[in-house]
């Protein structure tokens, strides 16, 4: 985890006119506050004060810290032998590294920005004006030498940089501290707990399933292996119907899966908690299956690190909405909140949005051969590597040639025709109950990874063809919509 940098001390100089300006601002909200801040300078401070260190200790000197947020119950953390912070009454988990560093930083090296008053009467008469009648947050830190300090942080001062009022129990002074410190110390207990990350890797995904706990609502599945050259183009929808899936839609789903993050820990899994959060009968269950394989990342030192992964399945159960933005989700034996929007790619998925809208599924660089059958005639295009010429540069794809029924034809001719074929898109969805005749034309695409795709054209209404892709018929195409391929070295097949 990236280390949280300590704040740099920065000297700030203020003239007394700032206090007069601040008093004028507060006058609009409260005459009393204006009177307090506009007293004679000698009543507030005998001399201008600037930033200073209120606490300056080593992290190992901390024994415990207690935090009481406005309106919440207090909680206490103790420092364990290994230096981690753990809940006082629950040693089963330690505070996350990031939250631990923030707390330790602020309660062992605490800086104030300004001393606003040396006279306690300036704020104790009306503590509610400073947010100190019930502080925004009170923090008590205890140290190994037996001493302790209690900080009471109140409202925003209204002065520059979003400072907050603060007092220290046993002292008369009224301090100003930065909003960053106030925010760091005003921490919800729930966010202290480390949150696991569902280990979903897009490169390893080979199946995504959405159920309602009883039946499969939608499922996408890879045909073949994740290591296949055409793995990105070889997905299909298997429920609620079967049909090849669109490559871009699958890439988007895989990326959405990899980006799923748990929010805040809510509760352990118990029968009572499952009922409370709507997880005793989940609305949706998301299952992400990953094949065994490896992933790689570039480290901070520029080294490419490869990590081996076993076959794995990640399951998320979706419960009730926590609020307008989050939803309760069960992951393993714990309940978390999750950003609702990140789940919609799966919970609100329409299968028709991810079907392939084009008949040709195999990109040219994955094609091994193509056979076209029509009216008893067969055209077979076989692609193969040319004999090495010795001119290829390292990393370049080897040059290829095309054989049509055993005879070489210009590769560029086939390439141009095939590129046009890849742009063909369906004209529309066949209506329910549509009927069509037997296929009159068939394309068979064989891939370099050993896979096979078929496209069959069947007369539907005399103007349009029903198109059967890999055995599934869902769309129609205007007659002649499939662009032509070269029938010889200088001719193009009829459409």
Image (cartoon, rainbow, N blue to C red):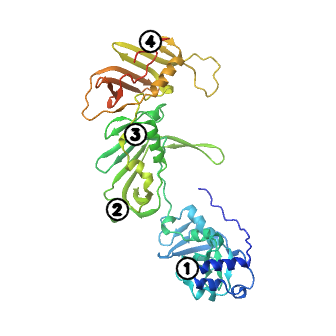
Looking at marks 2 and 4 on the same chain, the residue that comes earlier in the sequence is marked by 2
**How many C-alpha atoms fall within 10 Å of the one at disc 1: few (<14), some, or many (≥20)?**
many
Percent position (x, y) of residue 424?
A: 43, 28
Label 2 vs label 3: CA separation? 33 Å
Percent position (x, y) of residue 128?
A: 54, 83
State the mark number for residue 155. none
Which residue is tagged 4? 405
Q: Check disc 2 and report its element: helix, strand or loop.
A: helix
Label 2 vs label 4: CA separation? 65 Å
The foreground one among 463 and 203 is: 463
Looking at marks 3 and 4 on the same chain, the residue that comes earlier in the sequence is marked by 3
Q: Check disc 1 and report its element: helix, strand or loop.
A: loop
Label 1 vs label 2: CA separation? 38 Å
Which residue is tagged 2? 274
The foreground one among 171 and 465 is: 465
Label 3 vs label 4: CA separation? 36 Å
């Amino acid at each position: 985890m990236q280390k949280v940098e300590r704040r740099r001390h920065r000297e700030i100089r203020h003239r007394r006119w700032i206090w007069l300006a601040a008093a004028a601002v507060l006058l609009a909200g409260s005459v009393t506050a204006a009177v307090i801040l506009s007293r004679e300078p000698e009543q507030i401070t005998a001399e201008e004060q600037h930033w200073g260190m209120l606490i300056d200790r080593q992290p190992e000197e901390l024994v415990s810290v207690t935090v009481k947020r406005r309106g919440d119950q207090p909680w206490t953390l103790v420092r364990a032998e290994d230096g981690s912070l753990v809940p006082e009454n629950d040693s089963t988990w330690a505070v996350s590294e990031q939250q631990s560093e923030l707390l330790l930083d602020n309660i062992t090296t605490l800086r104030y920005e300004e001393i606003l008053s040396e006279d306690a009467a300036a704020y104790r008469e009306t503590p509610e004006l400073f947010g100190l009648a019930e502080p925004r947050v009170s923090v008590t830190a205890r140290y190994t030498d037996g001493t302790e300090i209690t900080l009471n942080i109140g409202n925003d001062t209204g002065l520059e940089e979003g400072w907050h009022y603060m007092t220290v129990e046993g002292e008369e002074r009224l301090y100003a501290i930065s909003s960053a410190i106030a925010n760091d110390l005003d921490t919800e207990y729930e966010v202290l707990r480390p949150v696991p990350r569902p280990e979903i890797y897009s490169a390893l995904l080979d199946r995504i399933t959405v159920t309602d706990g009883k039946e499969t609502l939608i499922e996408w599945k890879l045909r073949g292996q994740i290591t296949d050259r055409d793995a990105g183009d070889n997905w299909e929808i298997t429920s609620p119907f079967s049909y090849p899936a669109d490559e871009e839609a699958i890439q988007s789903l895989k990326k959405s899966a990899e980006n799923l993050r748990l929010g805040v820990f809510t509760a352990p899994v118990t029968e009572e908690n499952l009922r409370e959060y709507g997880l005793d009968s989940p609305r949706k269950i998301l299952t992400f299956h990953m094949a065994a394989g490896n992933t790689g990342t570039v480290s901070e030192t520029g080294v490419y690190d490869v990590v081996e992964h076993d076959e794995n399945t990640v399951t998320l159960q979706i419960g009730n909405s926590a609020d307008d933005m989050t939803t309760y989700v069960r992951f393993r034996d714990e309940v978390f909140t999750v950003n609702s929007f990140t789940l919609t790619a799966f919970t609100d998925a329409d299968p028709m949005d991810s079907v392939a809208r084009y008949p040709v599924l195999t990109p040219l660089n994955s094609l091994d051969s193509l056979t076209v059958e029509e009216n008893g005639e067969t055209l077979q295009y076989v692609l193969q590597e040319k004999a090495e010429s010795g001119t290829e540069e390292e990393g370049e794809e080897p040059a290829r040639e095309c054989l049509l029924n055993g005879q070489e034809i210009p590769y560029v001719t086939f390439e141009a025709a095939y590129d046009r074929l890849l742009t063909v898109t369906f004209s529309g969805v066949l209506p329910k109950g549509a009927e069509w005749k037997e296929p009159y034309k068939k394309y068979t695409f064989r891939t370099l990874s050993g896979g096979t795709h078929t496209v069959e054209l069947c007369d539907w209404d005399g103007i349009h063809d029903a198109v059967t892709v890999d055995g599934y018929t869902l769309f129609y195409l205007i007659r002649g919509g499939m662009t032509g391929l070269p029938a010889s070295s200088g001719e193009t097949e009829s459409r």
